Amino acid sequence: MDRTPSVRDDEGLTRVVRSGGFFRFLAARTISQWGDTFNGVAVVILVYRMTGSGLRVGGAVAFEIAPVLLFGFLAGAVVDHWPRRRVLVGADLGRAAIAAAVAVFHSQLWMLYAAAFGLSAFSVFFSPAASSVVPALVDKDRLVGANSALRSAAVLSQIVMAPVAGGLVALAGAGPAFGLNAASFLVSAGLLGRLGLPRRPPAPPGRHLGQIIEGLRVIRSSRFLSTLAAVQALAALSTGATSALLVVLAERHLHVGAEQFGFLLAAIGVGGGLGPLVLSRLVRDVGHPGWLFGPYLLRAAVDLLLATTANFGLALGALGLYGVGTSTGSVAYQSVVQTGVPDAVRGRVFAFLDVVWQTARLASIGLGGVLADAYGITAVYLLGGCLLGAAGLLGLMRAGDPPGRPAGVAS
């Protein structure tokens, strides 16, 4: 594929955000992410208070992962076959109903696990559809800016809402947090229902199984995509446990409570907010392997530091750097896949990479919970740092140039 043209300096984040349909899409994603933040903070705090077990905290996240393994390949075929706006709205309405139910019924552990499974089941269809429609909402030379805006909005939501969520759960319990999540999905569905998308060519007839196999062939035939899948697996083996058990690190190692835990999440968000700014202002080529895989090495160093310090302030700063690495890598990853993969199979490629990520993440959570309870939470972060380092080195050594390598914004 031809290389994406460079984006001019005056076509940065501000102009991308003002682009018609993209603004509506960005608003819908941001509002639902506000609710997700309240939900995520409430679930981990509630499960840990109910059980006192790192393994069972990991269990809540495991129930979020299971639907990806069950429905991920099917979701990719559905996203490439059915109108993507319909998929997005239907997923939001389903998640709103589940979030409303758990706002009332959350007094038992099985209810939280069931809600985690149900919310994730609809998200399995929403996620590849959302990633796949961005190139239809903005010009090709603004794609990096669009992904940067989406990432910035997501982390800003985390910065603002995570401490508020922690305080709300501490003062009023988990019910209001779950209720806000339900409301956010309804607002998102209303915005996405009015989203203008260009008409796509009719999907060729065929069964979903054949469409799934076609998507797998696309990935297998690409050295870059197959390497990216291997890197995703290694990284997920680390971050599944370390992300799910951050609340355990806060309680057992840093010795802080719910409100301070919210600030740890916000620190990741602060760093995540800086990452897209770096890409949009300073980087000419976000498809360079260094920007795709170098962030794994930064995150590896952070995990190793968290395992060796109990200083809350130092942990906040380290998690800020972790956020920088996460956001820069995410924007580069999204932009490269959106540019290099044809629209007709894009949903299946995104869904496959999600399945790889979540499969390894599920294994990580199970092993991490056992490791945390048996040997302490610091052992989880030490191992996590080693796995992230291996992921970064593998990508740098084997991936080569990505397809449709997109350019960034140079200042």
Image (cartoon, rainbow, N blue to C red):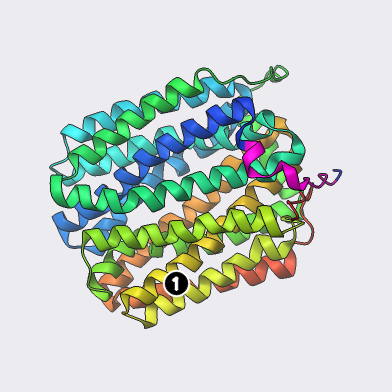
Q: Position of residue 43 (x, y in %)?
A: 26, 48
Q: Which residue lies furthest to the bottom in this view?
A: 308
Q: Quick one: label 1, few (<14), some, or many (20+) residues within 10 Å?
A: many
* Magenta span of residues: 3-16
Seen at 46% across and 38% down, the residue is 30
Depth order, front residue of 232/211: 232
Which amino acid does the dot numbered 1 rest on? Ala
- Position of 35 compared to 300: left or right? left
Q: What element carries label 1?
A: helix
Seen at 54% across and 27% down, the residue is 24
Depth order, front residue of 114/31: 31
Q: Is residue 217 visible?
A: no
Question: Where's the C terminus, which quadrant?
Answer: bottom right
Q: Where is residue 137 in the image (x, y as percent from the top left)?
A: 66, 29
Depth order, front residue of 370/181: 181
- Position of 32 compared to 18: left or right? left
Depth order, front residue of 14/379: 14
Q: Residue furthest front?
A: 10
Q: Where is residue 316 in the image (x, y as percent from the top left)?
A: 38, 69
Task: Name the residue beneath numbered marker 1.
Answer: 318
